[in-house]
Structures are given as structure tokens and as C-alpha cells.
């Protein structure tokens, strides 16, 4: 393994450890303030900013997507600016309302799966076991939010503890895969 990959993995672990207390605080903020309250919106923007920066520095799309999700919940005007900043000056980057086209889909799995770690693997992240990790919430559900393009369906599965595959319990459909099993399907409209 090259040194850059090792440093990135170490950085991801350190960031996850540093962010954990903030995630717990976020649960309290969500419990006591309605979603339009200044304290809640400000805290979500703060967490979103941390995630966007960490995602860029650590080259981690899952962290960046979580940051985008938190910023998007802060309001469409703010989200449009973040989307423009993220897109940069690349040719063909969507501008204006078209930049808002991705739909944030929350994937969740009950704690009954008895896992130490859960990864979301699918068409949208090249079936990577490291790209999209779920977090265990205080409500007992593993969850992660992913921005997906509407108008199509995506195959996915959960990888439990890095060794056991699990289908979603609430998928839109199930289709056979090339490995003799089935994949869960989410339809994004």
C-alpha cells in the first residue's frame, strides 16, 4: 500500500473520531429544535462545512456527500452556492437550477443486523467497500445519505463487517446478480 493511501486512511479514522461527539450533539440539536430553528440550521451548516473540507482533503466522496446533504438542508439559496463551489469551473458543469437535480436518498438498515460496521456498495460508488460507510444513529438505525441522479434505478447491497452481504429490507425491487445472489434496487424519481 502506498504511503498516501495509508495517510488518507489514518486521516479518515482521525476525522471519524473527532466528528463522533459532534454527531451525538447533532442528535440532541435535532431532538430539541425544529428544522428551521437558527441553532439547528447553523449547526448543520457547521457540520456540512467540516464534512466538505474533510472530504476534499481526504479525497473521500462519502464525507463530501454528507457535507452536501447538510448544506442542502440549510436552504436552496445556500445549497446553490455550495453546488457551484463544488462544481468549479469545469466545462459542462450544470449551472443554476440544473445543479439541484440530484436527489438525496437516505439508506438505512436496522441495528438488528448486529454489525460493527456497515458499508453501502452499489452502482453509484463502483461497489466500493470504503466509499460510503453508514453511521449508527441513536435511534438504532444505520444510515447514510447519498445524492443520486433522478430518472434511473441503482443496484446496491450492504456489506456487514467487511465480509457478509445483506440486501435492503425495504428496497424498491430485487434483481439477480452475476454472483448467484440478488441485489437491492432503489428507483430515484
Image (cartoon, rainbow, N blue to C red):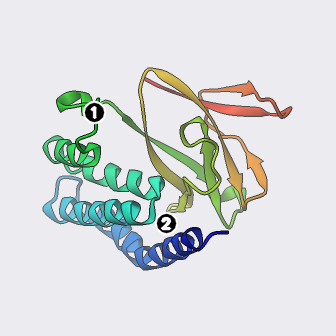
Residue of label 2: 138
Q: Residue at x 31, y 67 (%)?
A: 50
- Identify whether 176 is placed above or below 117: above
Tell me the quadrant of the picture where the N terminus can be found: bottom right
Crowding at label 1, few (<14), some or many (≥20) Cα neighbours within 10 Å?
few
Residue 54 lies, in percent from the top left, at: 38, 66
Instruction: Say whether marks 2 and 1 touch (CB < 8 Å).
Output: no
* Residue, far top: 151
Front residue of 142 and 65: 65
Tell me the quadrant of the picture where the C terminus can be found: top left
Left or right relative to 185: residue 145: left
Residue 162 lies, in percent from the top left, at: 73, 59
Front residue of 131 and 133: 131
Crowding at label 2, few (<14), some or many (≥20) Cα neighbours within 10 Å?
few
Q: Quadrant of residue 113?
A: bottom right
Mark toward the viewer: 2 or 1: 1
Front residue of 3 and 101: 3
Q: Residue at x 67, y 48 (%)?
A: 158
- Identify whether 180 is placed above or below 68: above
Left or right relative to 170: residue 159: right
Residue 57 lies, in percent from the top left, at: 39, 66
Left or right relative to 174: residue 171: left
Q: Residue at x 55, y 54 (%)?
A: 131
Say the numbered circle drawn on residue 105: none
Residue of label 1: 91
Residue 180 lies, in percent from the top left, at: 86, 32
Q: How many marks?
A: 2
* Marks 2 and 1, how far apart at CA: 42 Å
Q: Helix or strand or loop: what does disc 1 sit on? A: loop
Q: Residue at x 32, y 50 (%)?
A: 68
Amino acid at each position: 500500500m502506498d504511503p498516501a493511501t495509508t495517510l488518507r486512511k489514518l486521516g479518515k479514522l482521525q476525522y471519524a473520531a473527532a466528528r463522533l461527539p459532534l454527531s451525538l450533539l447533532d442528535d440532541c440539536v435535532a431532538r430539541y429544535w425544529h428544522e428551521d430553528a437558527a441553532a439547528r440550521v447553523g449547526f448543520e451548516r457547521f457540520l456540512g462545512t467540516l464534512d466538505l473540507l474533510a472530504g476534499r482533503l481526504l479525497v473521500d466522496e462519502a464525507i463530501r456527500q454528507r457535507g452536501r446533504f447538510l448544506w442542502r438542508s440549510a436552504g436552496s439559496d445556500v445549497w446553490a452556492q455550495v453546488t457551484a463551489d463544488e462544481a468549479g469551473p469545469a466545462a459542462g458543469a450544470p449551472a443554476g437550477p440544473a445543479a439541484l437535480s440530484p436527489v438525496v436518498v437516505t439508506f438505512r438498515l436496522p441495528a438488528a443486523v448486529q454489525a460493527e460496521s456497515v458499508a453501502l456498495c452499489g452502482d453509484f460508488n463502483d461497489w466500493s467497500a470504503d466509499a460510503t460507510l453508514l453511521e449508527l444513529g441513536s435511534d438504532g438505525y444505520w444510515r447514510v445519505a447519498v445524492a443520486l441522479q433522478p430518472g434511473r434505478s441503482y443496484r446496491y447491497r450492504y456489506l456487514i463487517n467487511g465480509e457478509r452481504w445483506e440486501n435492503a429490507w425495504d428496497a424498491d425491487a430485487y434483481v439477480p446478480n452475476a454472483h448467484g445472489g440478488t441485489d437491492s434496487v432503489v428507483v430515484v424519481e
